[in-house]
Structure formats: C-alpha cells, structure tokens
Image (tube, rainbow, N blue to C red):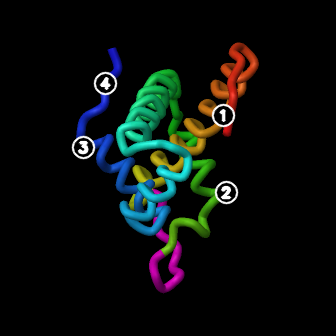
Amino acid sequence: KVEITDEELDAEYQEYAEFYGGEDALLESLATYNMTKDDILNDITTYLLTVKLIEKDITLTDEEIQSYYEENKDSFTTDDGEQLAFEDVKEEVRAALLEERIDAEYGTWLDEKFEQYDVKTY
C-alpha cells in the first residue's frame, strides 16, 4: 500500500529536467532513445515506489544520526564555513543519512533483480 503523489512525481521529474539543462533538453535526449515523457514518468514512478518500499524498512537511531554528523561535519556549515550545531541540523543530517541508506539498499535491490531476471540495457 505504497503510493506517490503527483507532487512527488513532478518534483522528481523536475530534478531530471534540471540535470539535463531543462525540460526541452530532457525530452530531446529521451527522443534519441525512442522514449517519451510518459516513458520517463513511468520509470520515475517505479523508482519512487521502490524507494518508498525500501524506506519503510530503514530505521535510524539517534546514535547513528549523531555519528553520521560527526563523520560529515564539513557538510553542515554556514555559508561562512562555521560549523552548525548538531541540534540545529539534526533533521537535515537524518535526511542525508536516510538518503545514503536508501541509495545503498536500492543498489542492492537492483543488483538482485538483474541476477533474477534477464535484463537488457541499451
């Protein structure tokens, strides 16, 4: 019972478009692979649903979050380079660690699917 909203789908699509330099450039790139906007939206939907399934099984402890902060302090600074206090960025740290864990789990899941099925890539 995992769902994604239109807003989540649109936000991810916009990230793709930004990566390619705008929606026109993205659509042009897709066309070279005989893909349409609907094709990429279907791919994004599958990706987002998979991420949500993976995320449900990930739990982060306060100790893990604190440890991640300590190991990555340089990532949590002001524009002037001043260190931000853990309590001020705890949710940002949690989100970064969660994203890292999701990426790792997604990679593992994808590897399993490539072994399980005859997947062709172009």
What residue would you read off at disc 4? 3
Residue type for callout 4:
Glu
Q: Tell me the chief SS of the magenta region.
A: loop
Q: Earlier in the sequence, mark 2 or mark 3?
A: 3
Residue type for callout 1:
Gly
Q: Is residue 44 above or below residue 72?
A: above
Q: Secondary structure at mark 1?
A: helix
Q: Mark 2 and mark 1: span between their CA atoms?
A: 23 Å
What residue would you read off at disc 1? 107
Q: Earlier in the sequence, mark 2 or mark 4?
A: 4
The residue stretch that appears in magenta = 78-86
Q: Residues within 10 Å of mark 2 (few under 14, many from 20)?
A: few
Residue type for callout 3:
Glu
Q: Earlier in the sequence, mark 2 or mark 1?
A: 2
What residue would you read off at disc 3? 7
Q: Position of residue 18 (x, y in %)?
A: 42, 63
Quadrant holding the N terminus: top left
